[in-house]
Image (tube, rainbow, N blue to C red):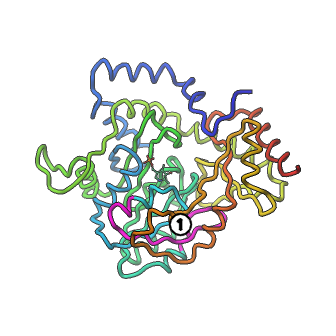
Amino acid sequence: MKPIRMVDLISQYEAIKSEVKSSIDNILENAQFINGPDVKEFKSELANYLGVKHVIPCANGTDALQISMMALGLKPGDEVITPSYTYIATTEVMGLLRLTPVFVDCDPETFNIRPEEIRKAISPKTKAIVPVHLYGQSCAMDEIMEIANEYGLYVIEDNAQAIGCSYTSKDGSVKKTGTIGTVGCTSFFPSKNLGCYGDGGAICTNDDELATKLQMVANHGQSKRYYHDMVGCNSRLDSIQAAVLRIKLRKLDQYIANRNNAAEYYNRAFASVEQIKTPARDFQSEHVFHQYTLQLDDSIDRDGMVEYLASKDIPSMIYYPVPAHKQKMFAELETRTGDLSTTDWLTTRVFSLPMHTELEEDQLKYICDSVIEYINK
Ligand SMILES: *Cc1c(COP(=O)(O)O)cnc(C)c1O
């Protein structure tokens, strides 16, 4: 059996090695490190894949969120409704820009932000909603867009974990996550579903005017060379990362299928294990399984489980042990919170198993047998 990794980028690389090497070599030969042809090609290939008008690449997913909030003109004191149950980057940028995150609770089944809680959190200061498509499944975008339209709010989708996921609206239309709201932000961090070999990110939108502004903010607020109309930042996707992403984008659907196969294996193995709740599915959303996250019931010692698996060379993770509203980072900052009891409870019970594109059946069997062994001990 191959060694089990939380994310196995080494085995994945084996299959695309020669393509990657020749692409990178070509960039080295031509010294087109910044804004080379691969960046332009990747922009249009990703736009085409997502079915969106504009893709603005940037340096990472955190920047994508920050640039979006800056381009939309969000100002200190503006309230932004967001889940507390997410990776810290989502809410950290709000702190950085001195916006006021308004933390709302998530759904105990899908882990995603609850539209009815968003509605309750709206105030005259609310400017935007930042839904996070957590673990690879879309938020309830029909309801979220309805609320946004009703109150005139921007929707900034944090799509870092769900690139490639399709969402079917009640009217039957199908869209990729990240293309439904005002803007969509994604990350190409190596372990993400579409990952490069360093840092990378992108923003997408169907709004022409906003696309120009996003591009300006990402490039020193520059409207034409050496003319800077606003304070921006310096956030680029380099050519080598774009070349890697072009190769991996062509395989993204296959990668998603592999992740789904692994998830199905886990689901079957745990179907009759009472103490384990397998990931719930939202019928309007596909699942691209960035993470395979279980809920363990109170009878299971979660730390004991992690240790037991580690003793058998099986990595596992807790995504996320501390929700945003309990992070010290926000202690001195303006925030608002409602009832976050589901979030607080979930952070004590969630448990993620290895999930990637290269999981093999003998590995899956060994992982599942070991989890069940621990429960029956
Ligand atoms: C990874 C991630 C980000 C940040 O992406 P980076 O490229 O690491 O900056 C933002 N939000 C979520 C939900 C993420 O998982």
Disc 1 residue type?
A: Lys
Tell me residue 127's x, y (percent): 36, 72
Tell me residue 340's x, y (percent): 58, 73
As helix, strand or loop, the secondary structure at mark 1 comes to helix
Left or right: 324 as drawn, with respect to 365:
left
In the image, is residue 346 above or below residue 310? below
In the image, 276 versus 178, the foreground residue is: 276
In the image, 334 versus 57, the foreground residue is: 334
> Which stretch is magenta?
93-115
* Residue ID for mark 1: 326
Would you say residue 249 sits in the magenta stretch?
A: no
Tell me residue 198's x, y (percent): 43, 35
Would you say residue 105 sits in the magenta stretch?
A: yes
Q: Quadrant of the N terminus?
A: top right
At a point 57% along the width and 63% down the height, the residue shown is 112
Check disc 1: other Cα within 10 Å, few if <14, some if 14-19, many if 20+: few
